[in-house]
Amino acid sequence: MKKTLAVALSALFASLILTSCQDPWMTNTSRNAIEQYMIATVIERISGAADFKKYKGKKVYMDYSLANPQVDKPYLQGRLEMELSRLNCIVVDKQEKADIMIQVLVGVLATDYKRFLIGTPPLPIPMPSTSLEFAIPEVAFFKRFQRIAYGRMAFNIFDAKTRAPLEVIPYINGSAQYNNYAILLFPFTTSDMDMKDTTSGKMNFSVIE
């Protein structure tokens, strides 16, 4: 009995001091906030890298039919049309009204993760002569839980009247990541995204020329 009590107390003590080493909390929704940040950042980076400067001031019809399966299509559509607005382009609702047509292709827009651990994984300990079980939490001397979003898009640009090809942007790749680390029980995070709150005093607005 004393041995059983000692094991239980040891497991409880370990759980109190080692909880910082557990995996980051994940929701059961289709996508949590960090994942949404990553996907949004990928879309912003790719749309910002698409060079449409030579079509400045044109009337543009956007063909998103090849992006229909994407959950994030509305944000992608808004960001691309924002870039066109910066160039004084007018996005029209029908192809016959346009000077050019831009066809959007989405090859990749998804998240992935990688996990690396130097230490010991969670260890279940059955209680003798009972159906109870305690678990000693994971002990991490070094741990990295890395979440990455990837995007790959392409653009076909046609004359809207004749559908003659004007330009092909074969692909633009983009990525974003968020990392959870634990070193000797001390957790911290790193990211290549801007996740700071925006204040009105620091907001930079683009001026459309």
Image (tube, rainbow, N blue to C red):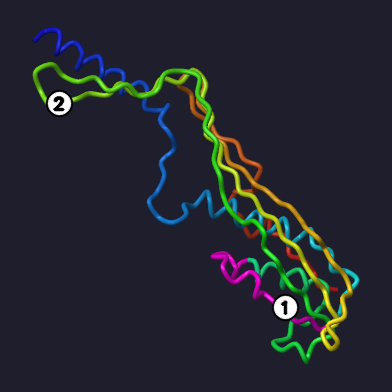
- Residue 4 is situated, as x and y percent measured from the top left of the image, at 14, 13
* Element type at mark 1: strand
- Residue 109 is situated, as x and y percent measured from the top left of the image, at 62, 56
Q: Which residues are magenta?
A: 59-75
Residue, disc 2: 132
Picture quarter with the N terminus: top left
- The structure residue drawn at horizontal position 86% and vertical position 87%, both measured from the top left corner, is 162
132 lies left or right of 150: left
Residue, disc 1: 62
* Element type at mark 2: loop
The residue lying toward the viewer, choosing from 86 and 149, is: 149
Picture quarter with the C terminus: bottom right
Q: Amino acid at mark 2?
A: Leu
- Residue 96 is situated, as x and y percent measured from the top left of the image, at 77, 91
- Residue 67 is situated, as x and y percent measured from the top left of the image, at 63, 69
- The structure residue drawn at horizontal position 87% and vertical position 76%, both measured from the top left corner, is 165
Estimate how packed mark 2 is, as few (under 14), some (14 to 19) or many (20 or more) residues with alpha carbons within 10 Å: few
| Above or below 133: residue 92 | below
Residue 85 lies in magenta, yes or no?
A: no
Residue 116 image label: none
Q: Estimate the spatial distance between the alpha carbons at disc 2 and disc 1, rounded to whole Å.
A: 61 Å
| Above or below 115: residue 129 | above
- In which quarter of the view is residue 129 placed? top left
| Above or below 159: residue 14 | above
N-terminal label among 2 and 1: 1
27 lies left or right of 189: left
Estimate how packed mark 1 is, as few (under 14), some (14 to 19) or many (20 or more) residues with alpha carbons within 10 Å: many
Q: Amino acid at mark 1?
A: Met
